[in-house]
Amino acid sequence: MNPFTRNRRESVAAWGEAKLITVIRRWLGDVSPRAPFGIGDDCAVLRPSRGRQLITVDPVIYGRHFDDRVPPRAVAEKLLKRNLSDIAAMGGRPVAAVLALTLDARVNRRWLEKFYRGLAASARRFRVTIAGGDIAQADGVLAASLTLLGEAAGPRVLTRTGARMGDWIFVTGMLGGSLHSGHHFRFTPRLAEGRWLARQRAVRALMDVSDGLAKDLHALTPRGAAPALDASALPRRAGADVRAALTDGEDYELVFALARSADQAAFLRRWRRAFPRTPLTCIGRFAAKGKFPADALNLADCRGYEHLR
Amino acid sequence: MNPFTRNRRESVAAWGEAKLITVIRRWLGDVSPRAPFGIGDDCAVLRPSRGRQLITVDPVIYGRHFDDRVPPRAVAEKLLKRNLSDIAAMGGRPVAAVLALTLDARVNRRWLEKFYRGLAASARRFRVTIAGGDIAQADGVLAASLTLLGEAAGPRVLTRTGARMGDWIFVTGMLGGSLHSGHHFRFTPRLAEGRWLARQRAVRALMDVSDGLAKDLHALTPRGAAPALDASALPRRAGADVRAALTDGEDYELVFALARSADQAAFLRRWRRAFPRTPLTCIGRFAAKGKFPADALNLADCRGYEHLR
């Protein structure tokens, strides 16, 4: 669906801001509580956090992240889920979001309704409150930036830092071919998995894979080490070759380091009991640069998605 | 300064995303702590809140909120201060912000450096941490959306709801002519004033004036009432007439309701001791619609800034 209309009566301009905000509150329904806990005051008020807080922001932009072929509902879902994947990557729990919308006055009200109803459905599913937002006008633009607030689910927050030489590298789900297969719209953020991982002492570092494993894995790699991957072990989506699995991006899976001293088999058994439907694969380990195994995949040849190029 | 360049070597595209993020961290300096408390992990981690939390989001967009005549530093300052004014309007204290930047690959690196250094200076001044953000690319766009997190400074958060019939209406500072005078870039958000007001029992409702008093005041007005204003009492900026004071917008002052039973003179004395340099004016009261004073200003004739029209 094309988000724009030439018919003024079908556009948001026919409503103006005040009416648009009223309508958005109706579309969001119970996902946006009454002011001041939802839309309608200078700020939204949230209850005190129960522990350390997490905050992340990600946008979707027309012409960049979606086009006319994508249903508005899917655009909204992806916007929320991209951010949820970041909360999952810290082992956290999502709490509330605010949405900054930038739109051309010719945006079709029907497109916007489907977008907000999709956002509401997705927010309800993942128990996120839409606490507020902003609407700004800009010619030729349709973009939405969502800031998601979360909190630590337990005493530990997992970060990208902490992996050590020799640690095993694990990845959830399948990699590659996300755009072709529609996975980048259909994926389920690994929230439960992330929280479970944060409770495992042997898990040392965690992140999500969004720009392709080859690029993202650098952030997890300890100094002096290189990720020595087993190409044949990479869990590839149907139709994706090794290069695709490493560089396609938008996988929204979790990659983490398991202490080399951990009992891998026991860890995998516990995982399968907790998440029988989420594949988990050991894809290699962090090796000393000087002792890089001859048969391991060299990521120096691969690049993930490079922004601003 | 024009934010775009035709010379690729001067543009952000010459750097690419990874290098740009490194440089942004340098520009922000101590205002953005090390990951995971600042830029560099999937989420930023914040300490638990000390009380109820406040969240707000506002953007600045090239061609809409600023143009080539505005120094990039002033753009960044305004972006932060617009959001701070919303925190002030609840009587809160700012804590941390995330910034979602949307830019064309031709954006000039020098423009961006001045923008981020301005943001850092302003964040330092108001003790706000820049905890993280996102960079996305979109042709022809330069926009920044800032989400600001704050917390209640005491037991009470002031909202727009709570004013009663007969309550006095007060406004801080001067109104009107904000765009002409440059006030919309130079203003100081009324954070200390907002926190002070939240501690006064007799103050019943508070908001900031950003779209013009005539429009904004509706949100403060109790049901069945109308704001009966004394036109001659309106604190007008030099050169602003009554209409300008009511409708120009971008004042970033506070307007609040004081209980009709309160001792106005005593309240003003205490205000002047606390804020000798911030004007405070009683501009009228909330009158019953049926008993509207004949000599009072009728706001039904005025409109503030209407978005999306």
Image: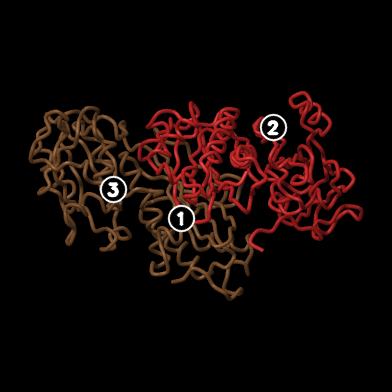
Chain colours: A brown, B red
Say which of A78 and A239 sits in front: A239
Element class at badge 3: loop
Residue B2 sits above or below residue A50 on the image: below
Count of numbered circles in the view: 3
Residues indicated by labels 3 and 1 sit on the same polypeptide chain: yes
Q: Which mark is residue B193?
A: 2
Residue identified by numbered label 1: A31
Q: Contact, CB < 8 Å: mark 2 with mark 3?
A: no
Q: Could you give the CA–CA distance between mark 3 and mark 1, rounded to whole angstroms?
A: 36 Å
State which quarter of the image contains the N terminus of chain A.
bottom left
Eye-nearest disc, 2 or 3? 3
Looking at numbered disc 2 in the image, what kind of residue is underneath it? Glu
* Quarter residue B46 falls in: top left
Element class at badge 2: helix
Looking at numbered disc 1 in the image, what kind of residue is underneath it? Val
Identity of the residue drawn at 65% across and 33% down: B191
Residue identified by numbered label 3: A304
Looking at numbered disc 3 in the image, what kind of residue is underneath it? Gly
